[in-house]
Amino acid sequence: MTAISVSVGAALAARDGAFSWPLYGLTLLAAVLMHAASNLINDYDDVRSGVDDPAVPTANYRPHPLLVRRLSLTAVRNAAFGLYALAALIGIALAVARGPAVLWLGLAGTAAGIAYTAPPFHYKYRALGEVSVFLMWGPLMVSGAYYVQRQAFSAEALLVSLPFGLLVALVLLANNLRDVEHDRRKGIRTLPILLGARRGMSLFLALIVLSYAAVAAMAVAGPLPRLSLAVLLSAPIGLRLLKRMATDMPLDADAQTARLDTVFGLLLVASMIAG
């Protein structure tokens, strides 16, 4: 999903007359490193605080390295900051070449990734996780990738970032819908806990529909090409996912949502390149 967000921004910049493979590669590498570092530091904080334990639903369908003792807390923390350091080096190089805005965008992404689960903010536990994911994988990442190419921001890039950012946020919402009872026992506030599982599912459905509708509207009225209507080819995946989640919440609801995002995103990027 990180690669798709970066590619959306770069494809828009290419349409506007500016694209460099080296800049694209460095931007993508920095974003992937930051994403990996954030995942590690979030796992570290979740285990250290006791939020993640052997009973967490995620551990039932994929190994959790910290819970099965394959890695120590110290090793995970050090690896996370090592990856952040590598991303920072790339960010500094890009800032020197393309302007200080790159550095500020990188700092914002790093701060958001760490504060997601780290005290005193840990806003994931305050029903703000979905908002953060939407902002990072939508406006921040897409606009950042666009800026690196063109050294300018674009209202159109911001607009196009919104539907994919919403879909990425749904990965976390699916996770929280599945984990609602576990999170309630741990005293965590998530959107499904605040809204209730039923209204949480209604929100999930509404945001999927909104994402498709937004791309369709932009394909008809601009700034996306008509070919971007191809994202509708992924709709059957979304319908099957909604049916499964409404009848019997799958343990891998988040992973299934991520698959929908990936197909949707690849179709979007391909249409932007071809159109």
Image (spheres, rainbow, N blue to C red):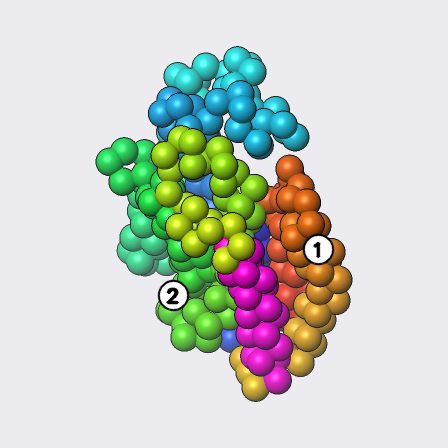
| Most foreground residue, 54 or 164 | 54
Residue 227's x, y, as percent?
Answer: 69, 76
Question: Is 199 drawn above or below residue 78 in the view shown?
Answer: below
Q: Quadrant of residue 222?
A: bottom right
- Assign the C terminus to one quadrant of the image: bottom right
Between disc 2 and disc 1, the foreground one is 1
Q: Report the residue marked by disc 2.
A: 151
Q: Main secondary structure of the magenta part?
A: helix
Residue 39's x, y, as percent?
Answer: 47, 35
Is 91 in the magenta? no
Is 208 in the magenta? yes
Mark 2 or 1, nearer chain start: 2
Q: Name the residue type under label 1.
A: Lys
Q: Are marks 2 and 1 in contact (CB under 8 Å)?
A: no
Q: Residues within 10 Å of mark 1 (few under 14, many from 20)?
A: few
Question: Is 179 drawn above or below residue 240 in the view shown?
Answer: above
User: From where the camera sits, is residue 174 visible?
Assistant: yes
> What residue is rendered at 37% in x and 58% in y?
98
Given the current orientation, which residue lies at the most extreme bottom position? 221
Q: Name the residue type under label 2.
A: Gln
User: From where the camera sits, is residue 106 visible?
Assistant: no
In this picture, residue 70 sits left or right of residue 81: right
> What residue is rendered at 37% in x and 43% in y?
189
Residue 119's x, y, as percent?
Answer: 27, 33
Q: Report the residue marked by disc 1.
A: 243
Q: Where are the magenta residues, as a range? A: 200-220
